[in-house]
Amino acid sequence: MKEFMMIFRSEERVERTTPEEMQAQIKVWQDWIGGIAAKDRFVATNALGMQGKVIRTNKPVTDGPYAEVKEMIGGYIIVKAESMDEAVILSKGCPTLTLHGGSVEIRDVMVF
C-alpha cells in the first residue's frame, strides 16, 4: 500500500468566523477524517498556520508562504491507498471542497 498526501487549498478568507461556526467546521473535519481512519487509511494530519517564510537560493528571505496570491494551503492529510484512484475516492467529502469551495491536490509520497 502506498501513501498519498492530500493538500488542502482555499481562497484566503477575511471574514470572521463565530465560535459556533468554528466548532461546526471542526466537527465536519473530524467526521471526514474519522471516516478515513475507520477504513484504516489514516496516517497523519495537521493544519498549517498563517505565517511563514520563503527561502530561495541567492534571494532574500520573504514573508510567506505566498504573499502574492490569495490562495492558501491550510493543511494536509496523509492516507494509505492502493492507488491514486483510491486516494481520489477518499478525498470525496473533504471539508475544503464543501465548506470553502477550495481544492485538494493529491500527491504520492516518494519513499527513498
Image: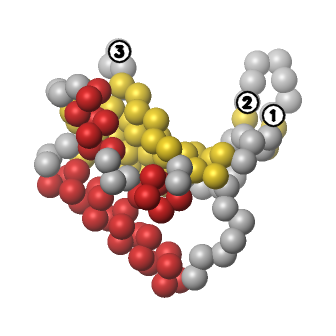
Q: Is residue 41 visible?
A: yes
- Image: 106 above or below 28: above
- Residue at figure coordinates x 69%, y 42% from the top left: 65
Q: Quadrant of the N terminus?
A: top left
Where residue 63 appears, as percent x and y from the top left, is 79, 43
State left or right for residue 69 relative to residue 78. right
Q: Quadrant of residue 104?
A: top left
Q: Which mark is residue 112?
A: 3
Relative placement, left or right, of 7 versus 87 is right
Asked if the residues shown at circle 2 and circle 1 are in contact, with their CB atoms under 8 angstroms apart, the answer is yes
Report the residue at 82% width, 18% height from top. Answer: 58
Compared across the picture, whether 39 is left or right of 51 comes to left
Q: Is residue 13 above or below residue 24?
A: above
Amino acid residing under circle 2: Ile
**Element at label 3:** loop
Label 2 – label 1 distance at C-alpha: 5 Å
Give me the C-alpha separation between circle 2 and circle 3: 24 Å
| Numbered label tally | 3
| Mark 2 crowdedness (10 Å alpha carbons): few <14, some 14-19, many ≥20 | few
Identify residue for label 2.
55
Q: Amino acid at mark 1?
A: Val
Instruction: Give the vertical position of 61 relative to 19 (above or below).
Output: above
- Residue nearest the viewer, comparing 86 with 60: 86
Left or right of 79, for residue 37: left
Which badge, 2 or 1, is on the more N-terminal residue? 2
Report x, y in % for residue 46: 43, 52
Farthest right residue in view? 60
**Residue 88 sits in quarter:** top left
Q: Amino acid at mark 3?
A: Phe
Q: Is residue 52 visible?
A: no
Q: Which residue is mark 1?
A: 61
